[in-house]
Amino acid sequence: MMFFLPKRKLVMLTSVVLILAVLTTANRLWVPGHSRQTISTILNFNRRVPIYCVQTAEKRIAISFDAAWGADRTDELLSILDEYDVKTTFFLVAFWLERYPEVAARIAAAGHEIGNHSATHPHMSSLSAEQIKFELETTHRLIKETTEQEATLFRPPFGEYNNLLIETVEQLGYHTIQWSIDSLDWRPTTPADIVQRVTGKIAPGAIVLFHNNAEHTPAALRPILDYCHQEGYEVVPISELLLKGEYYIDKSNGMMRPK
């Protein structure tokens, strides 16, 4: 037996089916630059995002280095940064700090900012609030003991995050920091590729991600700093790039903007 729905109900039913189809597909997708956050999460207006970059009219950027494995190239990086009189931010993992306390102390003594990169380098979005606190507080104490700095910036391992992470990090007095330019220096690459990848995306308020022990980072760093100088960019630690006063984080791109 055939039956007919009123036009209004038919439109409503069609809309519901389309929405369900989009959400079902979304759960199988991820968006580059959002650390495998699903599209359905991105469509959630209550979601929280870290700071990827900063809105500014000034030609200033921040350079950062993540340190989790190895330290063989760190002194060379420090020498280059000193040569250019540039200060940056190093995000340190607790087990790295325990293995290389003298290197961490040299980073701080050279005037660079120390950030928190967790204790065990876990997938933070799978942790409870108590586990997140353990990761940050353990590393915070080690940073203080080793470098005498009070860390206020946290970079989640693998760039993974969720609302619980960001909210817990804020409760501990930290900013959650991502990046807007990924050097991809940890991949098989060349110094020239790294230079092109980074300089091609430099813009006011950018945050650049490097790794302290990547093979080609020292060779790429000089040309990148030369480019910044030639283009009139000042390189500063991340905390100096962040806005003071009231701000909000643009959920579309993670930009820190003034209210």
Image (spheres, helix red, strand yellow):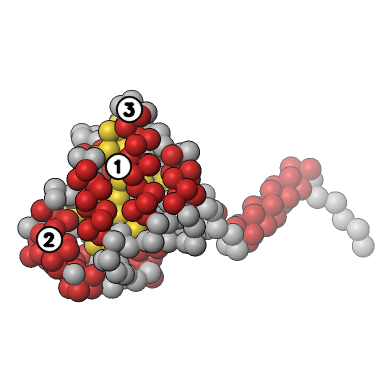
Hey, what amino acid is under mark 2? Ala
In this rendering, position of residue 178 left or right of residue 175: right
Relative to the observer, which residue lies in front, 56 or 110?
Answer: 110
**Residue shown at 37% from the left, 28% from the top:** 231
Hey, what amino acid is under mark 3? Gly
Horizontal and vertical percent position of residue 206: 36, 39
Mark 3 surroundings within 10 Å by alpha-carbon count, few (fewer than 14), some (14 through 19), many (20 or more): few
**Residue shown at 43% from the left, 39% from the top:** 199
Sequence order check, earlier mark of 1 and 3: 1
* Res. 158 visible in picture: yes
Residue 184 bears which disc, if any? Answer: none
In this rendering, position of residue 135 left or right of residue 105: right
Residue 105 bears which disc, if any? Answer: 2
Horizontal and vertical percent position of residue 91: 26, 58
Hey, what amino acid is under mark 1? Ala
Q: CA distance from mark 1 to mark 3?
A: 14 Å
Residue 62 bears which disc, if any? Answer: 1
Sequence order check, earlier mark of 1 and 2: 1
Horizontal and vertical percent position of residue 107: 17, 56
Q: From the image, state whether disc 1 or disc 2 is nearer to you.
A: 2
